[in-house]
Image (cartoon, rainbow, N blue to C red):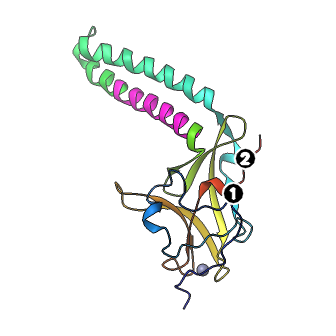
Amino acid sequence: MNGDNNGSQSGDGSLNVGVGDFRGATVHVGSGHPAFTPEQMALKRHLALGGASVKTETLNVFGVVTGVVSIIGLYFTLFQPFPQPLHSSWSALFMFALGLAAFSFVVAAVLRRKRFEPFLFRKYYLEAGTDDGIYLSSFTATCPWCRSRMTLRNLGPKNGPRYDSFVCERNPQQHTIRLDPTVLPEIQE
Ligand SMILES: [Zn+2]
């Protein structure tokens, strides 16, 4: 009954589900994924951490600093200027700092391009604001079919194509709406 997602199609040209680097979307073109405007879904953004943000600049500086730390850690790991007991902690520091540095750079680079990226527990997202800030946010909406609450989830297999869908709490199998992050309102700074 409600399974056929023949929701109202908006004529608004800005709603192009599946455009851009929206992973896996081409597979589903024309297969009954309707488009709704954020207004139709009563889409709400919830800024986590009280709306605190990090500047992209800060993230890059952080990446450089941890990158340097990881090189220092690598140096001590390879050459071991100190007695043995310190060895393992230096290599752990190296791995940890290297991971943080790589992560900081990747996040900064991805957000500059996409402005929106799944981040934590498949339900928290990193977003770029209008002035270089990076925010942690989650999203809810109202199901257009049954008026239940929907939450935005990053779905898909661990290593396979993932996508972001609003999932209805009452009928999570059938009431889903795939999100085109480009229709989200900007975070004004
Ligand atoms: Zn529903």
Q: Which callout, 1 or 2, points to the residue nearer the camera?
A: 2
Q: Tell me if 162 is positioned left or right of 11 in this view.
A: left
**Is residue 113 at all visible to an observer of this figure?**
yes
Locate the C terminus and report the quarter of the image it occupies: top right
The mark that comes first in sequence, 1 or 2, is 1
Helix, strand or loop at mark 2:
loop
Number of other residues with Cα within 10 Å of mark 1, as a class: few under 14, some 14 to 19, many 20 or more: some
Farthest-out residue, bottom: 1
Magenta-span inclusion, residue 110: yes
Q: Nearer the viewer, residue 48 or 1?
A: 1
Q: Which mark is residue 101?
A: none
Does the magenta run of residues contain 42? Answer: no
Q: Which span of residues is magenta-colored?
A: 94-111
Residue 169's place in the image compared with 101, above or below, is below
Residue 14 x %, y %:
68, 59
The quarter of the rendering in which ligand 1 is drawn is: bottom right
Residue for point 48% across, 59% down: 163
For disc 1, the marked residue is 45
Residue farthest toward the left in the current orientation of the protein: 84
Q: Amino acid at mark 1?
A: Arg
Look at the image and tell me in which quarter the N terminus lies.
bottom right
The answer to whether the residue labelled 1 contacts the one labelled 2, judged by CB atoms less than 8 Å apart, is yes
Residue at the location (72% across, 47% down)? 187
Magenta part, dominant SS: helix
Q: Amino acid at mark 2?
A: Ile
The percent coordinates of residue 100 (x first, y second) are: 45, 31
The residue where tag 2 is placed is 187
| SS class, disc 1 | strand
In the rendered structure, the answer to whether residue 174 lies left or right of residue 135 reads left
**Where residue 186 sits: x, y (%)?**
72, 48
